[in-house]
Amino acid sequence: MVTSLVTKLDRAEESARQQCAELSRQMEELQERLAVAERRLERLSIAREELTALEAADEPADAEGGEAAGIHPHDGGHTAPRTAGHAEVPHERPALRGLRKDAVVLLASSEEALRARDVVRALGQQDVRGQVEGMRARLKRLVADGWLVEREQGLFAIASGVNGFASGGGAATS
């Protein structure tokens, strides 16, 4: 009887060792996933700060707003004179990075216009108000930059003329 108890104890001890090893492996994996999630959260937080700064720079100063009124976020908010009635010279679309690029690629491959919530879900982000509102602001900025169009209130699609991407993040236009 003592032998069988020692054998049972040996088995239980080995099982506990295996369980500890498996839990340790899972903890290492979770720590790696946590580090990735924390890096992503930090990037999103920085992106939110940048977006907030850009939106603040684009706030209407009078009847026209932001850059349309000649206020440029990169020149310290100073106004540049504009001649009324003249068409703007077409500008090159800004390079895309991060979630802006992901959103454009997603919408370029989509057969239908998408809402901000659909884009958030498709990009694997949490479907929470903050993420959706941040994406909506990002999509509206992409409309202003010429990458996307807003077909109707809240429905975003790829802009005509955007048919692919150059390796540097710029767009090839037709």
Image (cartoon, grey):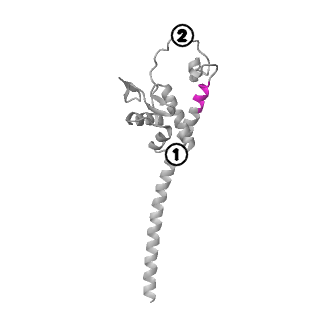
* Residue 125, x across and y down, in percent: 49, 44
* Residue 49, x across and y down, in percent: 59, 35
The residue labelled by disc 1 is: 127
- The quarter of the rendered structure image containing the C terminus is top left
Nearest to N terminus: mark 2 or mark 1: 2
Vertical placement of 16 versus 172: above or below? Answer: below
Q: Residue placed at 45% from the left, 29% from the top?
A: 148
Determine if residue 165 is in view.
no
Task: Give the CA separation, mark 2 to mark 1.
Answer: 43 Å
Q: Residues within 10 Å of mark 2 (few under 14, many from 20)?
A: few
- Image side of residue 105 versus residue 72, left or right: left
Number of numbered markers: 2
* Residue 80, x across and y down, in percent: 58, 14
Span shown in magenta: 52-59
- Image side of residue 120 versus residue 112, left or right: right
Does the magenta portion include 114? no
Q: Nearer the viewer, residue 45 or 142?
A: 142
The residue labelled by disc 2 is: 85
- The quarter of the rendered structure image containing the N terminus is bottom left
